[in-house]
Image (tube, grey):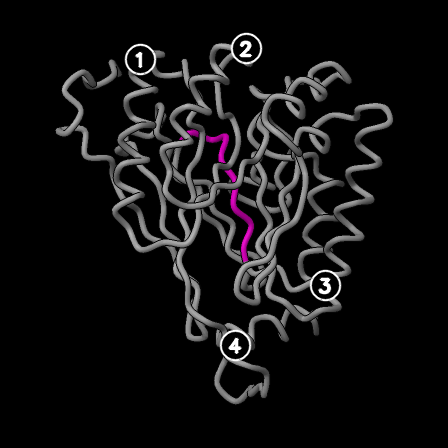
């Protein structure tokens, strides 16, 4: 908890009366996209809405983009080629998270190798302006994969501990939410197993995690846990809650960390029609 307070102090998220002498956080903004999932809402539809998202993001003053998993609906050479072609239109860096549609509901050595060879690493860490971003493969927490899940969990624990020691505020990126309504809820399709969830929440509190960003739910799912924000945002493919397609902009500064929704302007995409209910 002491490390979490240190990180929140850096971002000026603590109650009045707690001060810190560290250098103030340089402000920046980044985009959270969820479930581009080419083929979920209709293949051509999803291509067009992904292109529209790229167009709108390029017009924003943001530093980078994170896409929180399910890049495609069916992981094939052609769908990944289309995904990469649209992604290359971004004028800024982008960081990808693997989802269950990318590596399989039950990943295998073959499906993981295919993702790694075609897209890149499925878990890694990067820094930006005194903040650390830890990208995870939540499918390796959702199911036990021999020789992979334990390695992934050990890497996450070591990486979070290292970032905690550095004092950097940490954002963790995944595909599955930890939970959807209550941290003690039973496991279901849209969350992680309870023992794993409890351990991760402990690790997050111990190691300066200020937010956990995910996708998977195809609807806006926001929670707060001990000052941490947990957000699964709207998608660019298909939402189940009737919300518009779009993405979220995260603003990070010494004063506050917050996010806001940006809808896709589908009027600019002639070939995109409203999806059936």
Return the disc, 4 or 2, that comes first in the chain's sequence: 4
Residue where numbered disc 3 is placed: 206
Camera-nearest residue between 155 and 212: 155
Q: CA distance from mark 3 to mark 4?
A: 16 Å
Q: CA distance from mark 2 to mark 1?
A: 16 Å
Residue drawn at (72%, 20%) of the image: 113
Q: Nearer the viewer, mark 3 or mark 2?
A: 2
Q: CA distance from mark 1 to mark 3?
A: 44 Å
Q: Residues within 10 Å of mark 3 (few under 14, many from 20)?
A: some
Say above or below: 225 vs 59. Answer: below
Q: Dividing the picture into quarters, in which one does residue 211 lie?
A: bottom right
Residue where numbered disc 2 is placed: 76
Residue drawn at (57%, 27%) of the image: 99
In terms of secondary structure, where does tag 1 sit? helix
Return the disc, 3 or 2, that comes first in the chain's sequence: 2
Residue where numbered disc 4 is placed: 14
Kindly check if marks 2 and 1 are in contact, taking CB atoms under 8 A apart as contact.
no
Magenta span: 211-218
Asked if residue 213 is among those painted magenta in the image, a careful observer would answer yes
Image coordinates for residue 78, horizontal then vertical, percent: 48, 10
Return the disc, 1 or 4, that comes first in the chain's sequence: 4
Return the disc, 3 or 4, that comes first in the chain's sequence: 4
Which image quarter is the N terminus in? bottom right
């Amino acid at each position: 908890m002491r490390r979490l307070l240190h990180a929140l102090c850096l971002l000026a998220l603590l109650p009045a009366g707690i001060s810190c002498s560290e250098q103030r956080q340089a402000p920046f903004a980044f985009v959270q996209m969820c479930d581009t999932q080419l083929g979920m809402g209709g293949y051509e539809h999803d291509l067009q809405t992904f292109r529209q998202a790229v167009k709108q993001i390029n017009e924003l003053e943001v530093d980078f983009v994170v896409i929180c998993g399910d890049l495609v609906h069916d992981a094939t050479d052609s769908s990944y080629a289309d995904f990469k072609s649209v992604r290359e239109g971004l004028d800024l860096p982008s960081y990808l998270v693997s989802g269950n549609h990318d590596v399989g509901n039950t990943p295998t050595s073959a499906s993981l190798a295919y993702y790694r060879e075609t897209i890149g690493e499925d878990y890694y860490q990067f820094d930006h302006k005194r903040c650390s971003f830890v990208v995870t493969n939540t499918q390796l927490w959702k199911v036990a994969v021999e020789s992979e899940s334990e390695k992934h969990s050990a890497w996450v624990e070591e990486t979070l501990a290292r970032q905690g020691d550095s004092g950097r505020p940490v954002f963790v990126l995944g595909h599955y939410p930890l939970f959807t309504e209550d941290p003690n809820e039973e496991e279901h399709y849209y969350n992680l197993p309870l023992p794993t969830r409890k351990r991760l929440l402990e690790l997050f509190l111990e190691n300066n995690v200020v937010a956990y960003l995910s996708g998977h739910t195809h609807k806006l799912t926001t929670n707060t846990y001990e000052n941490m924000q947990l957000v699964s945002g709207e998608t660019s493919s298909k939402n189940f809650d009737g919300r518009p397609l779009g993405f979220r902009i995260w603003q990070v500064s010494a004063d506050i960390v917050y996010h806001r929704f940006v809808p896709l302007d589908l009027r600019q995409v002639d070939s995109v029609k409203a999806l059936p209910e």
